[in-house]
Amino acid sequence: DTAVSQTPKYLVTQMGNDKSIKCEQNLGHDTMYWYKQDSKKFLKIMFSYNNKELIINETVPNRFSPKSPDKAHLNLHINSLELGDSAVYFCASSPYRQVQETQYFGPGTRLLVL
Amino acid sequence: RKEVEQDPGPFNVPEGATVAFNCTYSNSASQSFFWYRQDCRKEPKLLMSVYSSGNEDGRFTAQLNRASQYISLLIRDSKLSDSATYLCVVSELTGGGNKLTFGTGTQLKVEL
Protein backbone atom coordinates (compact mmCIF):
# COMPACT_ATOMS: atom_id res chain seq x y z
CA ASP A 1 0.00 0.00 0.00
CA THR A 2 1.31 3.44 -0.92
CA ALA A 3 1.35 5.65 2.16
CA VAL A 4 1.70 9.05 0.45
CA SER A 5 0.88 9.25 -3.22
CA GLN A 6 1.13 12.11 -5.69
CA THR A 7 -0.16 12.67 -9.20
CA PRO A 8 1.10 13.30 -11.72
CA LYS A 9 4.62 11.98 -11.42
CA TYR A 10 5.85 14.14 -14.29
CA LEU A 11 4.45 17.42 -15.56
CA VAL A 12 5.80 19.31 -18.58
CA THR A 13 4.04 22.54 -19.45
CA GLN A 14 4.46 25.95 -21.01
CA MET A 15 5.08 29.21 -19.19
CA GLY A 16 1.88 30.99 -18.25
CA ASN A 17 -0.19 27.84 -17.89
CA ASP A 18 -2.07 26.81 -14.73
CA LYS A 19 -1.51 23.33 -13.32
CA SER A 20 -2.45 21.25 -10.27
CA ILE A 21 -0.68 18.50 -8.35
CA LYS A 22 -2.61 16.13 -6.12
CA CYS A 23 -1.53 14.38 -2.94
CA GLU A 24 -3.21 11.74 -0.82
CA GLN A 25 -2.09 9.95 2.35
CA ASN A 26 -3.60 6.83 3.90
CA LEU A 27 -1.63 6.97 7.15
CA GLY A 28 -4.37 8.67 9.12
CA HIS A 29 -2.11 11.67 9.75
CA ASP A 30 -3.53 15.06 10.62
CA THR A 31 -0.87 17.22 8.98
CA MET A 32 0.27 17.44 5.37
CA TYR A 33 3.00 19.48 3.72
CA TRP A 34 4.27 20.66 0.36
CA TYR A 35 8.01 20.95 -0.25
CA LYS A 36 9.96 22.22 -3.25
CA GLN A 37 13.32 20.72 -4.22
CA ASP A 38 15.15 22.95 -6.66
CA SER A 39 17.87 22.13 -9.18
CA LYS A 40 20.51 22.38 -6.47
CA LYS A 41 18.64 19.67 -4.54
CA PHE A 42 17.72 22.04 -1.71
CA LEU A 43 14.48 20.90 -0.10
CA LYS A 44 12.37 23.68 1.38
CA ILE A 45 8.95 23.70 2.97
CA MET A 46 6.22 25.67 1.20
CA PHE A 47 2.99 24.96 3.10
CA SER A 48 1.60 22.92 5.93
CA TYR A 49 -2.03 22.03 6.59
CA ASN A 50 -3.54 20.50 9.69
CA ASN A 51 -6.96 18.95 9.29
CA LYS A 52 -7.78 21.18 6.31
CA GLU A 53 -6.46 24.35 7.97
CA LEU A 54 -3.38 26.23 6.69
CA ILE A 55 -0.78 26.44 9.46
CA ILE A 56 2.54 27.15 7.71
CA ASN A 57 3.00 29.43 4.69
CA GLU A 58 6.64 30.02 3.95
CA THR A 59 6.78 33.17 1.82
CA VAL A 60 5.57 31.46 -1.30
CA PRO A 61 4.28 33.56 -4.23
CA ASN A 62 0.51 33.79 -4.21
CA ARG A 63 0.47 32.05 -7.60
CA PHE A 64 0.73 28.91 -5.47
CA SER A 65 -2.53 27.98 -3.76
CA PRO A 66 -2.84 24.83 -1.68
CA LYS A 67 -6.23 23.29 -1.05
CA SER A 68 -7.16 20.58 1.42
CA PRO A 69 -10.64 19.11 0.84
CA ASP A 70 -10.13 16.73 3.79
CA LYS A 71 -7.27 15.75 6.04
CA ALA A 72 -6.16 12.93 3.75
CA HIS A 73 -5.73 15.18 0.70
CA LEU A 74 -3.65 18.24 -0.04
CA ASN A 75 -3.53 19.63 -3.56
CA LEU A 76 -1.32 22.35 -4.97
CA HIS A 77 -2.52 24.65 -7.72
CA ILE A 78 -0.05 26.86 -9.53
CA ASN A 79 -1.18 29.80 -11.66
CA SER A 80 0.80 31.51 -14.40
CA LEU A 81 3.70 29.09 -14.29
CA GLU A 82 7.20 30.56 -14.59
CA LEU A 83 10.51 29.00 -15.61
CA GLY A 84 11.71 29.20 -12.01
CA ASP A 85 8.87 26.97 -10.88
CA SER A 86 10.65 24.01 -12.49
CA ALA A 87 11.51 21.69 -9.60
CA VAL A 88 10.47 18.53 -7.85
CA TYR A 89 7.49 19.02 -5.55
CA PHE A 90 7.14 16.62 -2.64
CA CYS A 91 4.08 16.09 -0.52
CA ALA A 92 4.56 14.77 3.03
CA SER A 93 2.46 13.93 6.08
CA SER A 94 2.92 13.49 9.81
CA PRO A 95 0.88 13.29 13.00
CA TYR A 96 0.03 16.79 14.25
CA ARG A 97 2.30 18.64 16.63
CA GLN A 98 4.43 15.62 17.36
CA VAL A 99 7.89 17.13 17.10
CA GLN A 100 9.59 13.79 17.50
CA GLU A 101 7.58 12.32 14.66
CA THR A 102 9.16 12.25 11.30
CA GLN A 103 7.42 13.09 8.08
CA TYR A 104 6.62 10.62 5.33
CA PHE A 105 7.19 11.80 1.79
CA GLY A 106 5.41 11.05 -1.45
CA PRO A 107 7.39 10.06 -4.55
CA GLY A 108 7.52 13.61 -5.90
CA THR A 109 6.16 15.42 -8.95
CA ARG A 110 8.77 16.56 -11.44
CA LEU A 111 7.59 19.83 -12.95
CA LEU A 112 9.32 21.27 -16.01
CA VAL A 113 8.19 24.65 -17.28
CA LEU A 114 9.26 25.43 -20.84
CA ARG B 1 24.14 31.61 6.47
CA LYS B 2 22.00 28.53 5.86
CA GLU B 3 19.98 27.23 8.82
CA VAL B 4 21.38 23.72 8.41
CA GLU B 5 24.82 23.35 6.85
CA GLN B 6 26.45 20.23 5.47
CA ASP B 7 29.51 19.48 3.39
CA PRO B 8 28.00 18.71 -0.04
CA GLY B 9 30.68 16.17 -0.94
CA PRO B 10 30.74 13.95 -2.88
CA PHE B 11 32.45 11.54 -0.58
CA ASN B 12 33.87 8.70 -2.70
CA VAL B 13 34.83 5.75 -0.51
CA PRO B 14 35.68 2.09 -1.11
CA GLU B 15 33.39 -0.66 0.11
CA GLY B 16 34.07 -1.48 3.73
CA ALA B 17 35.28 2.01 4.60
CA THR B 18 34.04 4.07 7.53
CA VAL B 19 32.73 7.50 6.62
CA ALA B 20 31.52 10.38 8.78
CA PHE B 21 29.20 13.25 7.91
CA ASN B 22 28.87 16.44 9.89
CA CYS B 23 26.13 18.99 10.14
CA THR B 24 25.66 22.26 12.01
CA TYR B 25 22.43 24.11 12.65
CA SER B 26 21.81 27.71 13.61
CA ASN B 27 18.40 27.62 15.31
CA SER B 28 18.90 26.93 19.02
CA ALA B 29 15.12 26.39 19.33
CA SER B 30 15.40 23.20 17.27
CA GLN B 31 13.94 20.33 19.22
CA SER B 32 14.36 17.15 17.20
CA PHE B 33 17.00 15.96 14.81
CA PHE B 34 17.07 13.41 12.05
CA TRP B 35 19.13 11.96 9.26
CA TYR B 36 17.25 11.29 6.05
CA ARG B 37 18.50 9.44 3.02
CA GLN B 38 17.58 10.41 -0.53
CA ASP B 39 18.37 8.15 -3.46
CA CYS B 40 18.70 9.61 -6.93
CA ARG B 41 15.30 10.73 -8.27
CA LYS B 42 13.51 9.42 -5.18
CA GLU B 43 11.86 10.94 -2.14
CA PRO B 44 13.69 11.50 1.17
CA LYS B 45 13.26 8.69 3.65
CA LEU B 46 14.03 8.67 7.35
CA LEU B 47 17.30 6.94 8.15
CA MET B 48 17.31 7.56 11.88
CA SER B 49 16.43 10.02 14.59
CA VAL B 50 19.28 11.58 16.56
CA TYR B 51 19.25 11.73 20.34
CA SER B 52 21.44 13.68 22.73
CA SER B 53 22.82 10.49 24.19
CA GLY B 54 23.84 9.26 20.76
CA ASN B 55 22.21 6.29 19.11
CA GLU B 56 23.14 3.40 16.90
CA ASP B 57 21.24 1.42 14.30
CA GLY B 58 23.33 -1.39 12.90
CA ARG B 59 26.22 0.14 10.98
CA PHE B 60 24.92 3.68 11.52
CA THR B 61 25.72 5.84 14.55
CA ALA B 62 24.31 9.32 15.09
CA GLN B 63 25.49 11.90 17.59
CA LEU B 64 24.09 15.23 18.71
CA ASN B 65 25.89 18.03 20.54
CA ARG B 66 23.29 20.63 21.49
CA ALA B 67 25.85 23.01 22.99
CA SER B 68 27.79 23.14 19.72
CA GLN B 69 24.65 22.74 17.58
CA TYR B 70 26.36 19.92 15.76
CA ILE B 71 25.08 16.60 14.45
CA SER B 72 27.05 13.71 13.02
CA LEU B 73 26.45 10.44 11.23
CA LEU B 74 28.97 7.62 11.11
CA ILE B 75 28.61 4.76 8.64
CA ARG B 76 30.78 1.71 9.25
CA ASP B 77 31.57 -1.03 6.76
CA SER B 78 30.11 0.92 3.82
CA LYS B 79 28.09 -1.02 1.25
CA LEU B 80 27.48 -0.15 -2.38
CA SER B 81 23.83 0.25 -1.44
CA ASP B 82 24.73 3.08 0.96
CA SER B 83 25.38 5.34 -2.05
CA ALA B 84 22.89 8.17 -1.71
CA THR B 85 22.54 11.73 -0.48
CA TYR B 86 22.31 12.07 3.29
CA LEU B 87 20.20 14.95 4.56
CA CYS B 88 20.61 16.46 8.01
CA VAL B 89 17.22 17.63 9.29
CA VAL B 90 16.20 19.67 12.32
CA SER B 91 12.68 20.07 13.61
CA GLU B 92 11.00 22.84 15.53
CA LEU B 93 7.50 22.78 16.92
CA THR B 94 6.12 26.23 16.09
CA GLY B 95 2.69 27.73 16.49
CA GLY B 96 2.16 26.59 12.97
CA GLY B 97 3.07 22.99 13.53
CA ASN B 98 6.08 20.72 13.16
CA LYS B 99 8.54 22.47 10.85
CA LEU B 100 11.41 20.50 9.32
CA THR B 101 14.46 22.34 8.00
CA PHE B 102 16.69 20.37 5.67
CA GLY B 103 20.38 20.68 4.99
CA THR B 104 21.52 20.65 1.39
CA GLY B 105 22.71 17.08 1.76
CA THR B 106 26.00 15.22 1.53
CA GLN B 107 26.47 12.89 -1.40
CA LEU B 108 28.07 9.51 -0.72
CA LYS B 109 29.41 7.21 -3.43
CA VAL B 110 30.61 3.80 -2.32
CA GLU B 111 32.81 2.12 -4.89
CA LEU B 112 34.16 -1.39 -5.45
Image (cartoon, coloured by chain):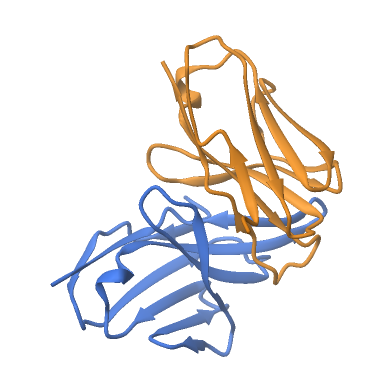
Chain colours: A orange, B blue
Question: Foreground: B21 or A31?
Answer: A31
Q: Where is residue A1 in the image (x, y as percent from the top left)?
A: 63, 59
How many numbered marks, from 0 up?
0
Residue ranking furthest to the front = A1
Q: Is residue B36 above or below residue A81?
A: below
Left or right? Give the position of B28 relative to B109: right
Q: Is residue B79 left or right of residue B111?
A: right
Residue situated furthest top in the rendering: A16
Q: Please name whichever residue, A93 or B102, is drawn nearer the observer in this view of the structure.
A: A93
Q: Residue furthest left?
A: B112
Residue visible at 83% across and 47% down? A71
Q: In which quarter of the image is the C terminus of chain A?
A: top left
Residue B63, position as x, y percentages in the image: 48, 82
Residue B87, placed above or below residue B60: above
Residue A43 place in picture, x, y as percent: 50, 47
- Relative horizontal placement of residue A65, taking residue A108 as reference (left or right): right
Instruction: Please name the residue shown 52% across and 80% down the image.
Output: B64
Identify which residue is drawn at 73% across, 55% down: A26
Residue A42, compared with residue B3, is above or below; it is above
